[in-house]
Amino acid sequence: MLKIYNTLTREKQDFVPIEPGRARMYVCGMTVYDYCHLGHARVLVVFDMVQRWLKASGFDVTYVRNITDIDDKIIKRAVDNGETIGQLTERFIGFMNEDAAALGVQKPDHEPKATEYVPQMLEMIGRLETNGLAYQAADGDVNYSVRKFPGYGKLSGKSLDDLRAGERVEVDSAKQDPLDFVLWKHAKEGEPFWTSPWGNGRPGWHIECSAMSSRLLGKHFDIHGGGQDLQFPHHENEIAQSEGAHQCAFVNYWMHNGFVRVDDEKMSKSLGNFFTIREVLKKYDAEVVRFFILRAHYRSPLNYSDAHLDDARQALTRLYTALKGEAAGGVAVDWNEAHAQRFRAALDDDFNTPEAIAVLFDLASEVNRSQSPALTAQLKALGGVLGLLGRDPQAFLQAAPAAAGDLTPADIEQLIAERAAAKKAKDFATADRIRKELTAAGVVLEDSAQGTTWRRA
């Protein structure tokens, strides 16, 4: 049985869906005012893997990943650029979709935009006000009264008495308590707004996810995911809003992926070690980046460095090298086979992708020894469960990014043709010289009865 580490209970638990055979999952997505960075890449890939495994395990999955397309940063960036908010957000939604597709991330079943669900947010705020959990302050904002919700802090483990004003909470004299958070922001001059019973304004950030998830998945659903940085206050506030409005449990299993670090330091713009997905993909193949992310357990820190990406590229090359003799066409996983059973056990243990990938390497070693077509097909099929090994092996092996001045694929093919002609003419000195030239350029030749193939080292 699948076990999931539940942040709420702080232990692994058997996954028992609310509806037998059906899994409903919501993941906090991107705020679209800039290019996606490595932290976003991890969220995209991790929860893509989760929904893939749920489907492979036989669940009917409904996967929702939202888009925040209205907030302070978006408004400021649009003003700075001299464009509308819609122009800004649509452009970066397009960039986000390109990045996700490059990383092999499947589209979620629903990808709601915050601006499309304002009526649902207003309805929820009204419920909270009726239930005595929301109030309108003197400045026009509508705030959530944190101390009136008895379960506040159960996700993060934080005590209200330990939370001080100014420590990740906004100090605002208009609030009844500094811990209270905004549900509806009153309109400022020049900002976009919607009409509401509390005057013109726009939604606070936290209410977006509560409203969208309940509308698309129901008041009570199975899995809620996101980055570790969202555990407090965002997800804590979601629980307070959703359970306060609907008077029932909100989510059964909370999943949080670990932080991304760069050369063992926290990634941040101030440290100058902040990388967008696009910057990384200029240097590394997108499947290498996906493999690098999945080779770490989703809850552990992920340390990015060129050395780690180079190692991931070499490791993925070993898997693709084992696939060079694969038969054309897709083959289903044989779940009765020993490697597949170990693979399943690993992923059923809180999505243990490092162990699952170790199984792939064991299977690749067996393929190299036996040259078994059945095991070769099994390797490809198991890799596909993780969104890996889906390309033509020779194409991958030849697609490693070339540094400036390196031989192009056309150059390499020409030299291989010249070497073949030299061997046919029994000019072995020339053939050896060409091989040495290619080896020095980081190109590995592999001769067989069918001809010569190549890959970058």
Image (tube, rainbow, N blue to C red):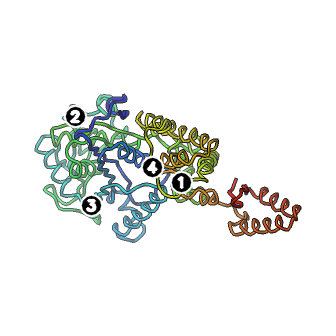
Quarter of the image where one finds residue 281:
bottom right
Which callout, 3 or 4, points at the residue further toward the start of the chain?
Answer: 4
At horizontal 13% and vertical 45% (from top left) the residue drawn is 129
User: Which residue is label 3 attached to?
Assistant: 115
Q: From the viewer's perspective, is the residue at label 3 or at label 1 nearer?
A: 1
Q: Which residue is mark 1?
A: 287
Distance from disc 3 to disc 1, alpha carbons, whole Å, reads 33 Å
Q: CA distance from mark 1 to mark 2?
A: 47 Å
| Disc 4 versus disc 1: nearer the observer | 1
Q: Which mark is residue 334?
A: none
Q: Tell me whether the residue at label 4 lies in contact with that at label 1, contact meaning CB atoms closer than 8 angstroms.
A: no
Contact, CB < 8 Å: mark 3 with mark 2?
A: no
Q: Secondary structure at mark 4?
A: helix
Q: Secondary structure at mark 3?
A: helix
- Is the residue marked by circle 3 packed among few (<14), some (14-19), or many (20+) residues within 10 Å? some
- 3D distance between C-alphas at marks 2 and 4: 37 Å
Characterize the local packing of mark 1: few (<14), some (14-19) or many (20 or more) Cα atoms within 10 angstroms.
Answer: many
Q: How much space separates mark 4 and mark 1, taking CA atoms?
A: 11 Å
Task: In this rendered view, identify the residue nearer to me: 271 or 33.
Answer: 33
Residue 134: x and y, percent?
Answer: 17, 44
Which residue is tagged 2?
A: 147
Q: Amino acid at mark 2?
A: Arg
| Residue 174 point in image, percent of width and height | 23, 45
Q: Amino acid at mark 4?
A: Val
